[in-house]
Every structure is written in C-alpha cells, then in structure tokens.
Image (cartoon, helix red, strand yellow):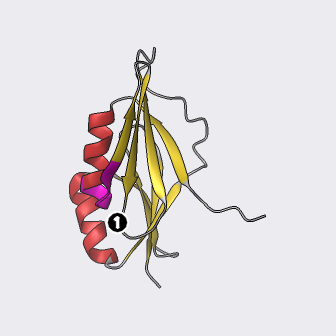
C-alpha cells in the first residue's frame, strides 16, 4: 500500500481575497472549482508539482475569522530567487516573521495562516 499527497485544505472567510493573495504572493492559479449551495472549493496549482492547495469557503460562516489556535501548522514554498520573493512580500506587507539565521521567512495570508518561504537548495 502506498499513500501520496493529494492536497492541503485551508478554510477561508473571503474566497476572492484569498485567491488574489495566493496569485500575487505565490503565483498560484485556480485549476478547478466545486461549488455547492453550502460551500465552494477552489483548487490552486503552482503549475509544476501535482500537489494542490484547496481553499474552502463556507456559506453563512458565522464569524469574521477562523480560530487558528496557536497556528503551529503551516505550508512551505521553495523559491528560486529568495531576494526577489522577499522584496515582493515586503512590498505587499505580508511578512510576519523572519529567521535570518536559518535563511527563511514567513508570510501571512488574509485568514492568518502562515506560509514558510525557503530558498531552493
């Protein structure tokens, strides 16, 4: 028996705002969408790997934000030009933590999820 990654899911309050963020900050594009009367799923791709990011928007979500607890779970993206990526994210105002010693930093999406940015090695 062999398991392989299919996708990761993040619940979002404003799907359009999140799609814009993931496009601008990480170059992800929407590959497909499943809409029901109660929720919408948008699957994002980097155009290279088979892995997908699923954004879930739930109709009539009663809160302004999701409770992320300690927010210790995160996604990580490898980038081929760390300086250019850092400049973009700094301009967007989305860098929330930097670890210069490790050569990485984190950005925060509109719902408060952290995304680690690591240099290609």
Residue 27, by quadrant, is bottom left
Q: Which residue is mark 1?
A: 47
User: What residue is drawn where x is 61% and y is 40%?
Assistant: 70
Q: Residue furthest right?
A: 1
Specify the farthest residue to the bottom.
Answer: 121
* Vertical comparison of 120 with 12: above or below: below
Task: Using residue 88 as the reference point, say whether residue 54 is left or right of it.
Answer: right
> Is residue 117 on the magenta stretch?
no
Name above or below for residue 75 compared with residue 79: above
Residue 119 image offset from top left, x and y in percent: 43, 77
Residue drawn where x is 23% and y is 53% of the image: 92
> Against 45, is 16 above or below?
above
In front of the other: 67 or 58: 58
Measuring 56% from the left and 55% from the top, which residue is drawn there? Answer: 6
Q: Which SS class for mark 1?
A: loop
Q: Alpha-carbon neighbours of circle 1 within 10 Å: few (<14), some, or many (≥20)?
A: few
The residue sitting at the front extreme is: 1
Where is residue 72? Give x, y as percent. 61, 48
Find the magenta span and give its range.
24-31
Residue 111: which quarter of the image? top left
Task: Where is residue 53? Give x, y as percent.
Answer: 45, 51
Quarter that holds the N terminus: bottom right
Q: Is residue 28 magenta?
A: yes
Viewer-side residue, 118 vs 70: 118
Residue 59 position in % (x across, y down):
40, 19
- What residue is drawn where x is 51% and y is 76%? 101
Q: Residue furthest left?
A: 91
């Amino acid at each position: 028996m062999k398991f392989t990654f299919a996708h990761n899911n993040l619940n979002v309050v404003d799907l359009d705002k999140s799609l814009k963020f993931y496009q601008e900050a990480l170059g992800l594009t929407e590959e497909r969408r499943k809409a029901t009367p109660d929720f919408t799923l948008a699957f994002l791709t980097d155009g290279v790997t088979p892995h997908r990011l699923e954004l879930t928007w739930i109709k009539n979500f009663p809160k302004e934000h999701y409770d992320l607890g300690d927010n210790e779970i995160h996604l990580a993206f490898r980038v081929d030009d760390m300086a250019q990526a850092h400049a973009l994210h700094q301009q967007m105002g989305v860098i929330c933590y930097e670890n210069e010693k490790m050569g990485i930093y984190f950005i925060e999406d509109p719902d408060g999820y952290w995304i680690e940015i690591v240099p290609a090695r």
